[in-house]
């Protein structure tokens, strides 16, 4: 990832494509919205597959399984329809869409998140965690990133794998968090000798998932449609249990890495602004009118919540889209040479003052009310773009909204003492939402709200 300060120093505010050299490899960087749009439209000479295959190998997938994932499949086969004979590595996106786009399968995931959050967002449960400290009667103090990460990872695991995985490995969520905070080493392709801690955590995750997928499918109750379907497709092309577990380690990573951090940042911005927090609290109250929680109400009738979500993403999305050049390609009037990589850092787009205004660095959700064209701008890329746009954008938004709604209805939340606002880990590459700098996890006091 290229921090904004480097881009400005390198370009002197000129947004033409430029190249950097990292470890002997050339990486072209695009920051101009029109160039980014051209790149996303190009599906012939800009390949995402090569990047995915490198990540798979770095995560421990065998050469045989990677080859199998990217070999054409029969057009007529059992399982998920594949009339174009796509390799499973590409068909997987359609499986994700079937699970994660609005419809019955997404509603099932929402119900799982409501179930898990409803159980975990209980003052007694929170007080029993290893990281909570009691500060008075019915009051606890927790580090906000640790709390949101713990709750979200447990919920994501339950939604996709049911209860069995937590029985097999009760500590898996913490192993994942250890891995996730170091996962940038995979994106930078660090040698194993200097990334042993990350790889050790990854291997423990894979071992637990291998035990899980060794259990007969009919005994793994509660797993998501995608989990079952993806396993069936992999077994149909000869991928064994160990490699299935390795692949599903990547899925586990994708499920949990961004939602936990997006929830943290959204809560942090709300707690920092009590007036905005109270406005959201009042707006969401009708979602509980029937005794349960209406996700449809949160989606369709909470414009303030929606604007806070969008502004949170604008500030915290810190990933970059990567493509491999399979042919010489002209973008922005410059020839990008075959064999190199192309990078699109989203943060530069999201802080473009020509699009988001002279206050682009301020947290101001109302900008999305005053200019509703922003969400259609080519500078708005929190979930990427083109054929690789993140299919999880709906479940991410809905699950975070569920957490926020339940937390604000049940608790009063405030920062302990006069802490500074947490600093993001700018410059550390991520799959989507940035983490916080070491030692920046803010303490939050939680009190049950009085009826």
Image (cartoon, rainbow, N blue to C red):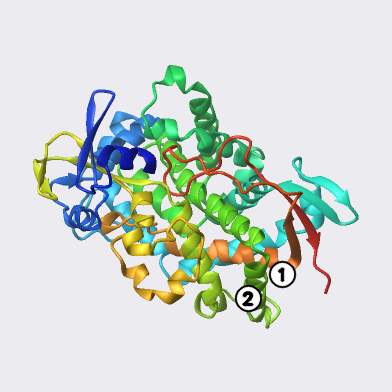
Q: Nearer the viewer, residue 133 or 304?
A: 304
Residue occupied by mark 2: 284
Distance (Cα) linking label 2 and label 1:
8 Å
Q: Position of residue 133 (x, y in %)?
A: 81, 44
> Is 435 displayed left or right of 24 in the figure?
right
Determine the residue positioned at 43% across, 36% down: 246
The residue identified by callout 1 is 409
Residue at the image point whose x is 25% and y is 45% from the top: 48
Q: Quadrant of the C terminus?
A: bottom right
As drawn, is 238 to the left or to the right of 265? left
The residue drawn where x is 40% and y is 66% is: 101
Q: For the residue carrying disc 1, how many other residues have a C-alpha within 10 Å: few (<14), some (14-19), or many (20+)?
A: some
Q: Which mark is residue 160?
A: none
- Quadrant of the rendered structure where residue 360 is? bottom left
Mark 1 lies on a secondary structure that is helix
Q: Identify the residue shown where x is 40% and y is 32%.
A: 186
SS class, disc 2: helix
For residue 360, side relative to residue 448 (left or right): left
Residue situated in front as seen by the camera: 184 or 440: 440
Whole-percent x and y of residue 104?
Answer: 47, 71
């Amino acid at each position: 990832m290229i921090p904004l300060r480097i881009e400005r120093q390198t370009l002197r505010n000129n947004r033409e494509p430029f190249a950097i050299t990292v470890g002997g490899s050339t990486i072209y960087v695009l920051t101009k919205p029109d160039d980014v749009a051209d790149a996303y439209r190009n599906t012939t000479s800009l390949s995402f597959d090569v990047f995915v295959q490198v990540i798979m190998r770095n995560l421990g997938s065998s050469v045989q399984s990677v080859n199998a994932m990217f070999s054409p499949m029969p057009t007529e086969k059992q399982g998920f329809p594949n009339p174009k004979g796509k390799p499973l590595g590409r068909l997987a996106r359609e499986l994700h869409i079937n699970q994660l786009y609005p419809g019955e399968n997404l509603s099932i995931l929402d119900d799982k998140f409501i179930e898990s959050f409803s159980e975990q967002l209980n003052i007694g449960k929170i007080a029993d965690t290893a990281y909570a400290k009691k500060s008075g009667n019915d009051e606890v103090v927790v580090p906000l990133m640790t709390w949101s990460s713990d709750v979200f990872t447990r919920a994501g695991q339950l939604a996709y794998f049911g209860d069995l995985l937590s029985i097999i490995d009760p500590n898996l969520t913490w192993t994942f968090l250890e891995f996730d905070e170091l996962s940038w080493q995979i994106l930078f392709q660090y040698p194993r000798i200097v990334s042993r801690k990350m790889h050790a955590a990854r291997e423990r995750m894979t071992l637990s998932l291998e035990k899980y997928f060794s259990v007969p499918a009919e005994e793994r109750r509660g797993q998501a449609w995608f989990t079952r379907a993806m396993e069936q497709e992999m077994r149909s092309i000869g991928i064994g249990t160990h490699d299935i577990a390795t692949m599903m380690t990547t899925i586990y990573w994708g499920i949990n890495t961004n939602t936990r951090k997006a929830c943290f940042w959204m809560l942090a911005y709300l707690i920092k602004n009590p007036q905005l927090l109270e406005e959201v609290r009042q707006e969401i109250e009708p979602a509980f009118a029937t005794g349960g929680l209406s996700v449809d109400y949160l989606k369709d009738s909470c414009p303030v919540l929606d604007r806070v979500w969008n502004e949170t993403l604008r500030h915290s999305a810190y990933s970059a889209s990567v493509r491999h050049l399979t042919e010489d390609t002209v973008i922005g009037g410059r020839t990008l040479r075959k064999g190199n990589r192309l990078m699109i850092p989203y943060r530069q787009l999201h802080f473009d003052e020509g699009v988001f205004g002279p206050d682009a660095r301020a947290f101001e959700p109302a900008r999305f009310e005053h200019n509703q064209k922003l969400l259609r701008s080519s500078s708005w890329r929190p979930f990427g773009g083109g054929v690789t746009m993140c299919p999880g954008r709906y479940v991410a938004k809905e699950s975070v909204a569920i957490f926020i709604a339940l937390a604000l209805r049940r608790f009063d939340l405030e920062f302990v003492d006069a802490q500074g606002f947490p600093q993001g880990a700018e410059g550390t590459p991520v799959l989507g939402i940035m983490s916080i700098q070491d030692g920046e996890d803010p303490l939050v006091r939680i009190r049950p709200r009085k009826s």
